[in-house]
Amino acid sequence: MHTKFWCLDINKEIAPQLKEAAECIRKGELVAFPTETVYGLGANGLDAEACKRIFAAKGRPADNPLILHIASPEEIMPLTSGLNANAKRLMECFWPGPMTLVVPRSSLVSDVVTAGLDTVAVRCPDHAVAAELIRQAGVPIAAPSANKSGRPSPTMASDVAEDMDGIIAGIIDGGECRVGLESTIIDTTSVIPTILRPGGITREMLEEVLGAVELDKGLVEEGVTPKAPGMKYRHYAPKAEMYIVEGDASGSLRMAEMAAAAGKKVALLGEKRLRPLQADMLFFPWENVDELANKFYDYLRECDRQGAELIISQGISDTELGLAVMNRMRKAAGKNIYKYFDGKLSLVSGKEAGFVVK
Ligand code: TXA
Ligand code: MG
């Protein structure tokens, strides 16, 4: 299949530039588009056959439901059998924005979208291109992240092309995504609203509005199945073996130096001030948690492109946006975690690294 590229000119009116892409969606074809979180792989959310094409293009298991994207908050109404007070409050406070609500589904929503669940996930993205595309398509757009299953989510159009060129009808290039991590998913149907996937709308922000909020046990406890079916997969994994180093900030640099000394091609993800002295070590720096969230997936893809054999990543605290970042980082590392304390590296979980000198 020939994949069309629409490179948007932001200095010109957006609407006419999206006409052809919206037409593709209406015809049941797949179009990747930018949102403020990551790029989505969109299809007509009311057309079950079109939604099936999403699963085929991504290689996505059929038991992993899709998010329906709407252009303005009130468009949720036909998709749900009813909203409780918590859901209404969250919509008022955080839509449009990087938050997905799990609500009771209506009969308009197909089993292909919900994977047979009695709830549906809905999001109103805070992105002019996404909103205009949905408006012109005239239907909710079902869209998972526009990566092949198991690859990092795409945060720019070139990432989408890496995974989807030749497989989908088109890609809308609307520049880099602002947040860089997928939306917060919150289940509003439980007695205490529950975060199923941490994201740009943080637990602290949700608690300020709702009071108590729970974190799905499946995200933090071994052996508990996550409530969001997609969260049980390893996802976001780079080709290289990856380790997280918690504790003293310089631990990641220390561990990367040991790996380099053992002859590995190493990539270090860490605070800017850790800059390694070895010129051949790949270094992916960040200054603060926002920048780390924004660049994390791009850095993982870049590690693959540059053939890193080993990725050492500095861990950060699980508060605010750090919760979302660490959730993705732990998945990418397959839970390989070391701790650096008092000048010593010790294994917390996962696989012992042969190159660590005790
Ligand atoms: O930021 C985002 O949310 C991006 C952009 C494109 O909007 N989309 C995204 O979609 O991350 P995806 O398909 O990669 O992740 C959707 C997650 C999956 O983990 C899925 O299992 C979960 O949402 N999900 C969907 N419907 C659900 C439901 N009814 N109940 C629980 N989890 C649900
Ligand atoms: Mg995804």
Image (tube, rainbow, N blue to C red):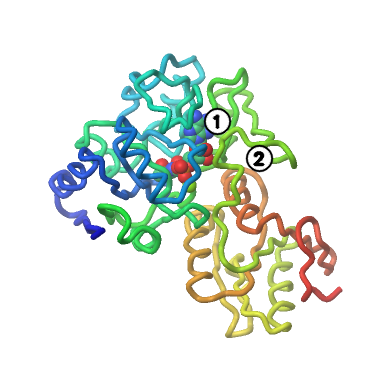
- Location of residue 166 in the rendering, given as x and y in whole percent from the top left corner: 30, 60
Vertical comparison of 127 with 47: above or below: below
* Kind of residue at badge 1: Leu
- Disc sitting over residue 206 in the figure: 1
Q: Nearer the viewer, residue 172 or 107?
A: 107
Residue drawn where x is 73% and y is 59% of the image: 337
Tell me residue 34's x, y (percent). Answer: 33, 49
Q: Closer to the camera: disc 2 or disc 1?
A: 2
Task: Name the residue: 60% across, 32% down.
Answer: 227
Drawn side of residue 155 relative to residue 312, left or right: left
**Callout 1: CB less than 8 Å from ligand 1:** no
Q: Is residue 219 left or right of residue 124?
A: right
Indicate the secondary structure of the residue bearing disc 1.
helix
Q: Is residue 86 above or below residue 96?
A: above
Screen quadrant of the C terminus: bottom right
The residue carrying pointer 1 sits among few (fewer than 14), some (14 to 19) or many (20 or more) residues within 10 Å by Cα, namely some
Seen at 43% across and 21% down, the residue is 105
